Image (cartoon, rainbow, N blue to C red):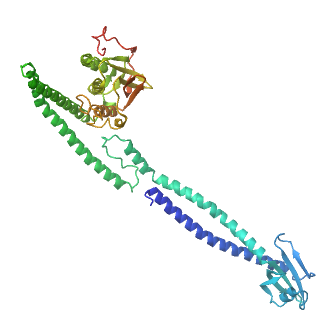
Amino acid sequence: MIRSLRGRLYVGLTAIILLTGAIGSMFAYRWAFGEAIELQDSILIQLASLAQNASFSGGQPLHGVEEDTEVWLIELGKTPRGSADDRQLFTLQDGLQVATWKNQPVRVLLRTRPDGSRFAVAQPTAIRDETARDVAFRTLLPIAALIPCLMVVTALVIAYSLRPMVRLAGDLDARRADDMTPLPLSAMPSELQPFITSINGLLARMRLLMDQQRRFVADAAHELRTPITALSLQAENLASVALPKRARERVAALRLGMHRTKHLLEQLLALARHEAAPTGLAEKPLAALDHVAKEVVADLLPEAADRGIDLGFALVEPLTVRGEPAMLAAIIRNLLENALRFTPRGGTIDIGVYREDGMAILQVEDTGPGIASADMDQVFEPFFRGSRPEGEGTGLGLSIVKRIVDSLGGRIALENIAGIGRSGLRATVRLPIAGDPDSSPSKGKESRETQAPEPGCG
């Protein structure tokens, strides 16, 4: 069963064209065949008119019209004579008849002269039929050539007529998941407008539900932050109290849970703040990507030092992009926190900020275990922590990064690093460049010791 509307239209119209062409061809063939027979009868009549006042001896062929027609003029005399075929022809009445002559059926025209002598003009019916079929077949050639042309034209007309629907589907596929702007009704066929109106109504309801969900998440996270902060402070105060070993272990577990809950709330608030700012890319402020990266790296240097991880820049160039500095910082911080969480002690995390093919590139490369290939398609989904979760992650970091990068008109890609004696993960973020600051790039990994006061040096 054909489910495609285009296929149904094409099959239906093709069937109509073929059926109409077959019926038309049949009538055209029969009409052309009859006309060819009548034309050959008129030729016999004309030849008989020429022979009306002249006499010929015996039966002789006439080739005056066409060499292959095999028209014969037969003198029958005033009384039956000659062969049995001639005597049989003599018995026929004047006019067009079908008879047998020389053991073959012929179409014969008999006439009587004023002196009483008779003659016949004969032509084999096989040749007449062959000529008529040839003429009729040539009549069908234009119809046979027209049918494929009609099928091609039908396919083009259907494709052109359904192009607005295909374009509409392409526009919907190219949209971001959170883009709920109504579809345009202008320049759309009237048949599609009710369908588009229904889609716009559905988008409006989905936008309302998403706004309610965002407000709920933001409000819940904001309301929970204060009591969680208070509980965290109380748990921190218990660290200075002399407690039995078993109690200290429980307090440590409590502090770890509080810290994770606080981190989750901060991620939810960051996600809510980002989704509550629907401004377009052109309306976003300019920000120096390299400065934001250095500030975030400087904040994370103490944590990297505690974990024994070498954190620093492999390449940094001054680049300006459009976006809130806080959102850019959220991208960099989430990528670096993931790298710190999975990189083992003694490992290395390299950050790169540079230009490539007209795009600003932010690259974070670590020496951790990478991401399982089965998890690659799901790592950007909210609350997904992979098949080997580790540390205090909430599963929101990469989801937040993906949403922010998409809103800034960029792309993010993750790839595992595989080599002899090494592994790791490379995260590459591409953002449109908004400006060209006039300052020379600084290349090479910056010293972790001599330049510790400079932001971004490990």
Q: Position of residue 317 (x, y in %)?
A: 38, 18
Depth check: give the residue in front, 43 or 137.
137
Query: What residue do we see at 84% from left, 88% from top?
Result: 88
**Res 212 → quadrant:** top left
The residue positioned farthest toward the right in the image shown: 57
Query: What residue do we see at 34% from left, 40% from top?
Result: 176
Depth check: give the residue in front, 11 or 113.
11
Looking at the image, residue 381 sits to the left or right of residue 441; the answer is left
Query: What residue do we see at 40% from left, 51% from top?
Result: 188
**Res 333 → quadrant:** top left
Number of numbered discs visible in the structure rendering: 0
Where 374 falls versus 288 (above or below)? below
Q: Quadrant of the C terminus?
A: top left
The residue positioned farthest toward the front in the image shown: 245
Looking at the image, residue 290 sits to the left or right of residue 4; the answer is left
Where 96 falls versus 6 (above or below)? below
Where 58 falls versus 345 (above or below)? below
Looking at the image, residue 288 sits to the left or right of residue 220; the answer is right
Q: Position of residue 421 (x, y in %)?
A: 40, 22
Q: Position of residue 77 (x, y in %)?
A: 90, 88
The residue positioned farthest toward the top in the image shown: 450
Query: What residue do we see at 40% from left, 26% from top?
Result: 417
Looking at the image, residue 133 sits to the left or right of residue 313; the answer is right
Q: Quadrant of the N terminus?
A: bottom left
Q: Position of residue 68 (x, y in %)?
A: 82, 70
**Res 102 → quadrant:** bottom right
